[in-house]
Amino acid sequence: MSIFDLAPAYIRAIAPYQPGKPISELAREMGLDASSIVKLASNENPLGISPLARRAVEAVLGELARYPDGNGFELKQALRERYGVASDSIVLGNGSNDVLDLAARAFLTPGDEAIYSQHAFAVYPLAVQAIGARGIEVPARDYGHDLDAMRSAITAKTRLVFIANPNNPTGTMVNASALESFLASVPPSVLVVLDEAYNEYLPRDVAFDSLAWLERYPNLVITRTFSKVYGLAGLRVGYAFASREGADLMNRVRAPFNVNSVALAAAAAALKDTDFVRKSYELNRAGMKQVTTGLAALGLEYIPSYGNFVSFRVLNAADVFQRLLKFGVIVRPIASYGMHYHLRVSIGLESENTRFLESLQQAIA
Ligand SMILES: *Cc1c(COP(=O)(O)O)cnc(C)c1O
């Protein structure tokens, strides 16, 4: 008997998450200078960490022998001030990935069903599978969530629905009225996890206030992150807003010190750096235009995106990915999302976008 046989079948069936290739790994493999590599593979903020967050990180270093504040008082306070959500309706996580896991652990048992869309964020099936619950993947419509079909997929066994808005890796979004009709139509026995990792990147003309729904829908959980526009992906910090009861349940399954003290301090400071967020937003708007214009000029189709990345169509995606690596440009293959003819590229600095487009032109020649 191998140790493999000791794990339940649903654990053995898990296909591990495939992260973007780290710069250091490509540098090793190709003998490239790390500083010459452009990584546009994980939707990170090309401006780096906010100056206010950096200062907060430096200030907390002397305290690292102490355990963090397990309740994250200051960060919750900062979130409360910013968004008007009570501290006991907030769940902090080691990245929002952690919070998505907490939702699955708090609300699913083996045999329950959880619904998500085809081409949706890979963490949903992973979180569901780790419980031994059944993931129901609903076919996408034009690469986006088909909310009507997702509503129809709800059965007596359904406990959870995941919605990524905007979705990664497709960049698609569902508008406020479609989402609200969906929420109104979902039975109160089903938890709706609305993953808004890219919320701060939503163009002003389509952005809307989902937090207002929390009062009306106690089965709603909204997750957000400091990994994207706030530039703190390496620190791992995210959060959920929920009803008080929902947050309480998720906090019960949370590891006692799941968010470290550096992350807590940096996130609270980053939240106040509105200047940095505005700059990041504007850089992304301009970069999105640059990249999509460039893709179109190369004759490549892309899926219009509301995030800080865009997925474009190439017939030989795996080859193009490899050729780009040789030029020192890392993008993201998304075959594991059922998208065999697409690659995803994150929006970078103007110079990085240019380097990507020039390399791509050669890679597809
Ligand atoms: C990046 C991303 C997250 C955030 O992950 P963290 O764990 O917070 O770094 C969550 N959802 C989606 C859809 C994402 O793309």
Image (spheres, rainbow, N blue to C red):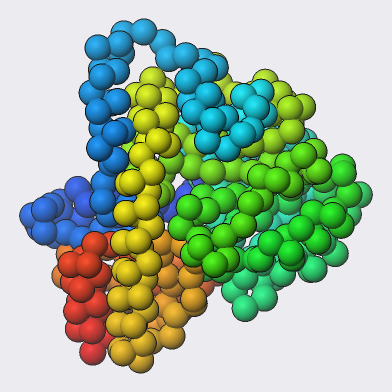
Residue at point 24%, 62% (across, down)? 349
Q: Viewer-proximal residue, 213 or 155? A: 213
Residue at point 11%, 59% (across, down)? 36
Query: Where is 149 relative to 8, above or below?
Result: below
Q: Position of residue 178 (x, y in %)?
A: 74, 65
Residue at point 62%, 24% (across, down)? 87
Looking at the figure, which quarter contains the N terminus?
Answer: top right
Does residue 125 appear in this view? no
Furthest residue in direction top, as rendered: 66
Q: Viewer-proximal residue, 9 or 44? A: 44
Furthest residue in direction right, as rendered: 156
Task: Please indicate whether residue 361 sits to the left or right of residue 211 in the image.
Answer: left
- Residue 51, by quadrant, is top left
Looking at the figure, which quarter contains the C terminus?
Answer: bottom left
- Residue 261, by quadrant, is top left
Query: Where is 197 relative to 39, above or below?
Result: above
Q: Position of residue 301 (x, y in %)?
A: 43, 85
Task: Please indicate whether residue 97 sits to the left or right of residue 147 in the image.
Answer: left
Q: Viewer-proximal residue, 235 or 128? A: 235
Residue at point 60%, 49% (across, down)? 195
Q: Position of residue 295 (x, y in %)?
A: 34, 82
